Image: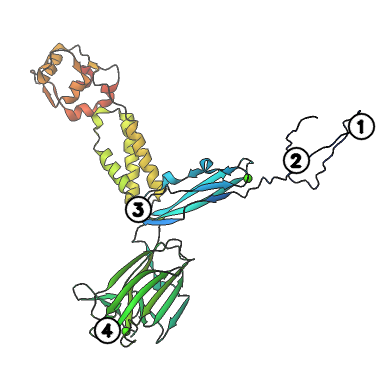
């Protein structure tokens, strides 16, 4: 060997590597200065770094951009971002509550697959659990411990509304400044926290004055400012998707804790409910399918649609179907609609009864042949002799015969 050569040898799983240089047989070892240049062990690792966006939550009807940035960097192959496959992003529906998973999958040049998943939670705010149904993790109180579902004076939780009227809440927390209540959110699968807050109505007109604060994972997400005893309640709504800890704080507002009855009213954790079943699309489709004109389609194709409609109506009436079942029937109606076969209305009607034929033409004002379409327009036909009388109901009840290729008008009418 006279020139340099690049050598690449797989050593996966090997225990020993031995580098050998010989004298290339016959000419001895004179001047055999050999060099292993830039010798290195390259790791074909699966230590790829895949960065994906965080799981997020939004409300039904409030779409968010889910095509956020992601990246894939492999120690050996470099930037593999272009090879990342995003799966499930097209299945996210912002018009339906649910938890939608988006997976990011990338395979490096050595075949190592890396996958990460995040969840898009779409929340109907009517899906909630009351916070007071859970135990808090800890409380710190300078005066007295908080109460679940009662004001701090052990009465109904009450606040003051915008028009200065009393509002009562069955659920919530009664606290007294200074108060800190901590909840562990890791087992609660919630996406939004909501609550009304204010000085309890019990202390209306008193010196009671407090400040409410909400911390999510140690970060302050809400501050009520100073609330006096006559102030109307304030509403809190915080996105807590993916959060681990919720901390509810009441301070004394700087004037001491006298009369500081602080009420957290109607305090809720809202979640993305995958069990919620949406039937609005099915209802709309059934409504539209029911007014389809049966006259212009073959009985067979029209009956298929009728069966799908009947199944849908049964499903809508019993109210027990899952979303998958509802969507299945919806698909079958859409399919049946597409598969409707139109009757050939240009088909010419044949009759040997000249008299009858003339009567039909006269009634419809026709000059040429009588077509099936003409017949379906026929609402009344009375021959001059008075022996023929037919209406559209009769015609449609005879559709099978009308549709067959070998009928004659007389066979229908007599
Ligand atoms: Ca690699
Ligand atoms: Ca105070």
Among the two numbered marks 1 and 4 on one chain, the one whose residue lies closer to the N terminus? 1
Q: Residues within 10 Å of mark 4 (few under 14, many from 20)?
A: some
Q: CA distance from mark 3 to mark 2?
A: 75 Å
Q: CB at mark 4 closer than 8 A to ligand 2? A: no
Foreground: disc 1 or disc 4? 1
Among the two numbered marks 3 and 2 on one chain, the one whose residue lies closer to the N terminus? 2
Q: Is residue 47 above or below residue 160?
A: above
Q: CA distance from mark 2 to mark 1?
A: 23 Å
Q: Which residue is mark 4?
A: 202
Could you tell me residue 207's position as x and y percent? 27, 86
**Residue occupying the point 48% across, 53% down:** 118
Could you tell me residue 102's position as x and y percent? 47, 49
Foreground: disc 4 or disc 3? 4
Q: CA distance from mark 4 to mark 3?
A: 44 Å
Among the two numbered marks 1 and 3 on one chain, the one whose residue lies closer to the N terminus? 1
Mark 4 touches mark 3? (CB < 8 Å): no
Quadrant of the rendered image containing residue 195? bottom left
Which sits in the foreground, 245 or 350? Answer: 245
Q: CA distance from mark 1 to mark 3?
A: 93 Å
Q: Which residue is mark 1?
A: 28
């Amino acid at each position: 060997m006279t020139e340099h050569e690049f050598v690449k040898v797989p050593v996966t799983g090997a225990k020993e590597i031995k580098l050998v240089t010989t004298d290339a047989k016959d000419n001895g070892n004179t001047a055999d200065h050999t060099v292993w240049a830039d010798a290195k062990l390259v790791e074909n690792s699966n230590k790829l770094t895949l960065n994906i966006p965080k799981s997020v939550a939004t409300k039904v009807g409030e779409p968010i951009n889910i095509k956020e940035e992601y990246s894939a960097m492999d120690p050996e192959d470099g930037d593999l971002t272009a090879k990342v496959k995003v799966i499930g992003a097209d299945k996210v529906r912002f018009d339906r509550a649910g938890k939608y998973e988006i997976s990011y999958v990338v395979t490096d040049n050595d075949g190592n697959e890396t996958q990460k998943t995040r969840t898009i939670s779409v929340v109907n705010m009517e899906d909630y659990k009351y916070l007071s149904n859970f135990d808090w993790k800890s409380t710190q109180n300078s005066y007295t411990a908080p109460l679940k579902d009662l004001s701090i004076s052990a009465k109904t939780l009450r606040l003051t509304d915008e028009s200065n009227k009393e509002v009562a809440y069955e659920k919530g927390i009664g606290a007294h400044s200074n108060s800190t209540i901590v909840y562990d959110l890791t087992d609660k699968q919630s996406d939004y926290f909501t609550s009304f807050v204010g000085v309890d109505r019990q202390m209306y007109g008193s010196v009671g004055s407090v400040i409410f604060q909400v911390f999510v994972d140690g970060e302050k997400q809400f501050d009520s400012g100073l609330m006096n005893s006559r102030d109307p309640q304030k509403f809190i709504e915080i996105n807590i998707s993916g959060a681990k800890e919720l901390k509810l704080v009441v301070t004394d507002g700087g004037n001491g804790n006298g009369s500081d009855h602080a009420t957290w009213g109607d305090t809720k954790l809202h979640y993305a409910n995958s069990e919620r079943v949406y039937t609005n699309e099915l209802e709309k489709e059934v409504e539209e399918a029911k007014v389809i004109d049966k006259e212009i389609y073959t009985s067979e194709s029209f009956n298929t649609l009728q069966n799908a409609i009947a199944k849908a109506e049964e499903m809508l009436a019993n109210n027990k179907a899952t979303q998958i079942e509802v969507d299945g029937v919806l698909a079958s109606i859409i399919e049946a609609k597409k598969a409707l076969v139109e009757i050939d209305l240009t088909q010419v009607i044949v009759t040997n009864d000249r008299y009858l034929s003339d009567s039909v033409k006269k009634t419809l004002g026709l000059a040429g042949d009588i077509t099936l379409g003409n017949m379906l327009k026929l609402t009344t036909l009375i021959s001059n002799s008075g022996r023929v009388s037919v209406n559209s109901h009769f015609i449609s009840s005879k559709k099978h015969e009308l549709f067959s290729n070998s009928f004659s008008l007389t066979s229908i009418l007599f």
